[in-house]
Structures are given as C-alpha cells and as structure tokens.
Amino acid sequence: MAVAARVIPCLDVAAGRVVKGVNFKDLRDMGDPVELAAHYAAQGADEITFLDVTATVDDRSTTFDVVQRTAEHVFVPLTVGGGVRSVEDVARLLSVGADKVGVNSAAIARPELIDEIADRFGAQVLVLSLDVKRAPSTASGFVVTTHGGRAETTLDAVDWAREAIERGAGELLVNSIDADGTKNGFDLELVGLMREASAVPVIASGGAGDVSHFAPAVQAGADAVLAASVFHSGQLTVGDVKDALRAEGVVVR
C-alpha cells in the first residue's frame, strides 16, 4: 500500500506573528499563529510546521509561549524549528506540545547536536531543516545556508543531508531559498536529488503558487509538500491541494 503524501501548511513566525516574504526578505504580517493553525487543522492539514524565522538571526530561543498556545488549540502533529541550539531546547519544545523539532543553523555549527538529539529522543523527533541555494561551485549544484537564508556556507546540500541522516535525522525539510515565496513552483531538481540521497522522508518546501505545483513535487520524490503563501492568502485550501493530488493519482489522507 502506498504511503499517503502529507500536506503541511507552514507558519513562519516572527515576534509572535505569522509573516511571509519573498526569498526570506521583506516579511509581511499574515496573522495570528494560533488562529491560522486551527484554521488549517480544520481544513485537514496532516501536520503544521512552525518556524521562528528570526530566532537564530536575533540569537534567541524559539518563542515557547506561542508554541504552547498553538499546541493547546491544534490536534495535528506540530513541528517546530528556529533557534533550537541544544538538547534542552528540544526537551522544552516537546514539553509545551511540539511533536517534532527542526534544527538547521545550530546543527551546521556543531553537527554532534544531531547525534545528541537523536540519541535522547529518537530519530522520529528530529527534522533536519535545509535552506538551500543553487551554487554551481558545489558537486550537487546546491549549497546550504544558515540564519534564515542570510548566510551561505560551503556545505554541499546533498552531502550535508547524507551526513545528517547518518547522525540520526529522521526527516528532511528541504526549502529552496531561490524559489521561496516566488510562487513559480517547487525546485524539482532539488527534490529529486534529495530523494536519491535520502533514506528518510523528504518534505518539499519553497515556491508553491498554484494547485498544479504540488503533484510534480511528489512525483519528483517528496513524501510531503509544504506551503505558506498560497494558504495564508486564501488562494488555496488544504482540501484544494489534496483534491489536486488525488486527481493526479497521488494517495493522500
């Protein structure tokens, strides 16, 4: 039996409000995270991802109170990332209602963090978040960035994904910085490369702008599709996306 593809609305949060921009810049207020999360859960979201997009840049922890308020009102799995730097941060997020925790910049700075989280909580809790840019200088053609896409590393994106999986990452959230907020569609080449490299689920993120963009991402190898702008604007509902996936023969919940 085929595993059902998941549809995941993403709440990019800054200062306790949901925001959205283009290529991680020019952030606009999109609403209250608790209200939006409840709205998407009612639409049939399989999971909700909550990313504190300025926590690392501001050198602070994720806003735990917003996570707790969201978890109290939403009864679908909640993944939380942004500003996670330690095993203690993960423990606290799980204690206030997160089901999975995403790590990015801190894991790049100290890869052993992945081992520590996986050893204590299990791979199923740990999502490696990759903010990826095209970079012809790398073997795969893609490089990893940190600090919400603001700082470019020298890490080849596919090599880093493989290392993280070996260390215990249970899922990859692959976000294309180039496609983010453009509404031109997912980076299918990037999705395909990550699928080839990964033995764990791959979530495609960045670029969804039309109902027709989601099935190609699944066909390229994504186990889940994540979007923000099209949901926040009301252009699409979770149900619209699932209907479009079903029409293309994709199994959904």
Image: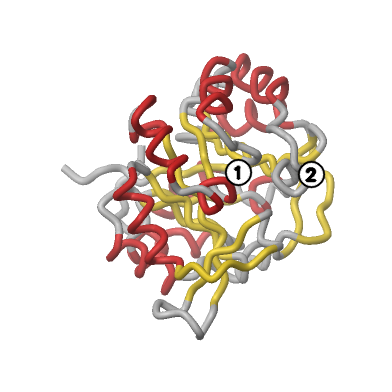
Give the residue drawn at x 72%, y 59%.
Answer: 24
In the displayed structure, does residue 185 sit left or right of residue 46?
right
17 vs 91: above or below:
below
Q: Residue at x 54, y 15 (%)?
A: 95
At label 2, the amino acid type is Asp
Q: Residue 145 appears in which quarter of the rendering?
A: bottom right
Which mark is on residue 203? Answer: none
Where residue 12 appears, x then y in whole percent?
A: 69, 44
| Circle 2 SS class | loop
Classify the position of the N terminus by image quarter.
Answer: top left
The front one of 54 and 174 is 54
Seen from the viewer's position, the closer of residues 188 and 159 is 159
Q: Quadrant of the C terminus?
A: top left
Image coords of residue 162 (percent x, y): 33, 58
The residue identified by callout 1 is: 10
For the residue carrying disc 2, how many other residues have a C-alpha within 10 Å: few (<14), some (14-19), or many (20+)?
A: few
Which residue shows up at 51% across the image and 48% down it?
Answer: 110
Instruction: Identify which amino acid the numbered label 1 is placed on.
Output: Cys
Q: Which mark is residue 58?
A: 2
| Residue at the image point whose x is 48% and y is 34% from the top | 47
- Secondary structure of the residue carrying numbered label 1: strand
Query: Which residue is nearer to you in this view: 15 or 241?
Result: 15
Res. 238 in view: yes
148 in relation to 116, above or below: below
Coordinates of residue 23 in the picture (x, y in percent): 70, 65
Query: Could you say which quadrant of the image residue 124 lies in?
Result: top left
Q: Residue 143: image x %, image y %?
A: 52, 70
Q: If you read the primary sequence from the N terminus, does the residue marked by circle 2 or circle 1 appear first?
A: 1
